[in-house]
Structure formats: structure tokens, C-alpha cells
Image (cartoon, rainbow, N blue to C red):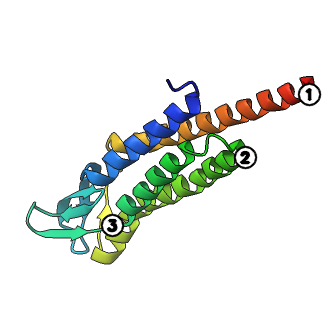
Amino acid sequence: MIQRQQSIYLFLISIICLIMALTDITLYKGKALQKDGASIDYKINAISSTLGCENSQKTSRFEIPVSMTLVALLSMATIFFYGNLNRQLTLVTANFGAIAIVLINVYLIKERIGGTNGITFQDLGMNWPIFLLLVILILNFLAVRGIRKDLDLLASADRLR
């Protein structure tokens, strides 16, 4: 039986990240303007992006899935350091950095695609998987809080001895 809540939080982070990395979910979708003023549809997924109609321009990108896999692996590795809480706290704090890399990649993917193809996006077009990144950030914060509570509990038990 898992008695530590932070293990559940870290496991949920790794499951969400692996699902987002292995499936080609849509992050952004909407309308964009080309240099000549023509309006096209765009669809930016985690792995690929499509500009224009479904067959016109499809490019593959692997920054987001690789960084999501890094977050998932770091979260799973952190679970197994339950015996050394200081190391576990260090790994969870490092996981904030990995999550920041994912957020930066997701934020800048539109700029990279727009700059490469010479288009400007008319609308924001965010889909619901973007908000899963906020859930991952909150779960990581809750894991840090749980580990700190365990450290405080051990420190108070040491004072009683």
C-alpha cells in the first residue's frame, strides 16, 4: 500500500507526460495568415504540425515529446528514492526545471513554425492539453510539499529522541 501522497502525485505526472508524449494530441488549432494575405488553417500537435489543408505542409518535431519523456522518467526515478528524502527533494526540484523546458517548448513552437513558414497566427487557438501542463506543475508542487512535510516529521521525531 502506498502511504505517501507524493508518490501518487509523481506517478500521475509520469502517466500524464507519457500519454502526452506518445499520442499526437492537438496543442494549437486555428487560422493563420500567409505573407500574401491568404488565410489558412493550422493544426499544431505534440509531434507534428499541419499548415493549410491536411495534405499541404506537414512537419515533424520532437522537442515536446522528448522533453515530456524526460519529465516522466525523472518523476518515475524520484519515486524510487523514498529512502533518501533529501535526494528525492533535489530530484523533484530538478523536475521543475524539466517542466519549465516543456512549457518553453510548447510556448515557442508557434513562433518557430510561424517564423520558418512566414505566417502570422490570427487567434490563440489553445486546446485543452495545454492545461494539462498546469496540472503537471501543480502536482509537482504538491509532491515537493509532501516531501518537505516528511522531512519536517523526521526532524521532529529526531528532536524527541
Residue at (26% x, 49% y) in the render: 25
Q: Measure the C-alpha gap from mark 2 to mark 3.
A: 33 Å
- As shown in the figure, which amino acid type bears the numbered disc 3? Phe
Q: Earlier in the sequence, mark 1 or mark 3?
A: 3
What separation in Å lies between label 2 and label 1 (alpha carbons)?
Answer: 18 Å
Q: Is residue 130 above or below residue 49?
A: above
Circle 1: residue type: Arg
Q: From where the camera sits, is residue 87 visible?
A: yes
What SS does tag 1 mark? helix
The reply to whether dot 2 and dot 1 touch (C-beta < 8 Å) is no
From the image, tell me which residue sits under label 3: 62
Task: Give the residue at mark 1.
Answer: 159
Residue 26 rendering spot, x and y as whole percentages: 26, 50
* Above or below, 156 relative to 136: above
- Hey, which residue is sitting farthest left in the picture? 55
**Secondary structure of the residue carrying numbered label 2:** helix
Q: Position of residue 100 (x, y in %)?
A: 54, 55
Number of other residues with Cα within 10 Å of mark 3, as a class: few under 14, some 14 to 19, many 20 or more = few
Q: Which numbered mark, 2 or 3, is in the foreground of this view?
A: 2
* Residue type for callout 2: Asn
- Quarter of the rendering occupied by the C terminus: top right
Q: Is tag 2's residue or tag 1's residue first in the polypeptide sequence?
A: 2
Residue located 25% across and 64% down the image:
33
Along the viewing direction, whichever of 81 and 66 lies nearer the viewer:
81
Instruction: Please tell me how crowded label 1 is: few (under 14), some (14-19), or many (20+) other residues with Cα within 10 Å.
Output: few
Question: Picture coordinates of residue 64 (x, y %)?
Answer: 38, 60
Q: Which mark is residue 86?
A: 2
